[in-house]
Image (spheres, rainbow, N blue to C red):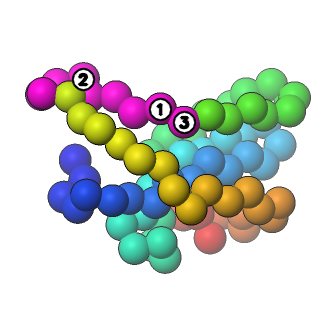
Amino acid sequence: IIPRNQVHLRIGKRGTGCVFHYSEDGHYWHLVRKFRMADKPLHAGFLVQSPTGQGLRAEFSSIRFRRETLGDVRSGL
């Protein structure tokens, strides 16, 4: 549960390892999920879901792509 009405999301890939992070301030990143995928090009898209409750509405903005390597996939640094 995110207490604010906005959140930063990030997908990272290093070799076959992929990670999802979120941040409330864009500086401190929380690990959501770490998993492996085949060592092939990664394709990403955007969606939202509301598995419980009345549903939701979302707007994606400030989308950026950066080609850089995360030093530590767990912490997002």
**Boundaries of the magenta span:** 46-54
Judge whether residue 32 is colored magenta.
no
Residue of label 1 = 47
Q: In this view, does 45 lie to the left or right of 9?
A: right
Judge whether residue 47 is colored magenta.
yes
Q: Residue 53: image x %, image y %?
A: 12, 28
Q: In this view, does 5 lie to the left or right of 73?
A: left
Q: Nearer the viewer, residue 37 or 59?
A: 59
The amino acid type found where label 2 is placed reads Pro
**Residue lying at 71% horizontally and 40% vertically, measured from the top left:** 17
**Residue lying at 23% horizontally and 61% vertically, measured from the top left:** 4
Looking at the image, how many numbered discs can be counted on the residues? 3
The amino acid type found where label 1 is placed reads Leu
Kindly indicate the quadrant of the structure image that contains residue 69.
bottom right
Q: Is residue 13 left or right of residue 7?
A: right
Q: Residues within 10 Å of mark 2 (few under 14, many from 20)?
A: few
Q: In this view, does 46 lie to the left or right of 55?
A: right
Residue of label 3 = 46
The amino acid type found where label 3 is placed reads Phe
Is the residue under label 3 in contact with that under label 1 (CB below 8 Å)?
yes
Q: Residue 43: image x %, image y %?
A: 74, 32
- Residue 8's place in the image compared with 14, above or below, is below
For the residues carrying marks 2 and 3, which lies nearer the camera in this image? 3
Kindly indicate the quadrant of the structure image that contains residue 58.
top left
Q: Residue 26: image x %, image y %?
A: 47, 72
Q: Nearer the viewer, residue 15 or 42?
A: 42
Which numbered marker is on residue 51? 2
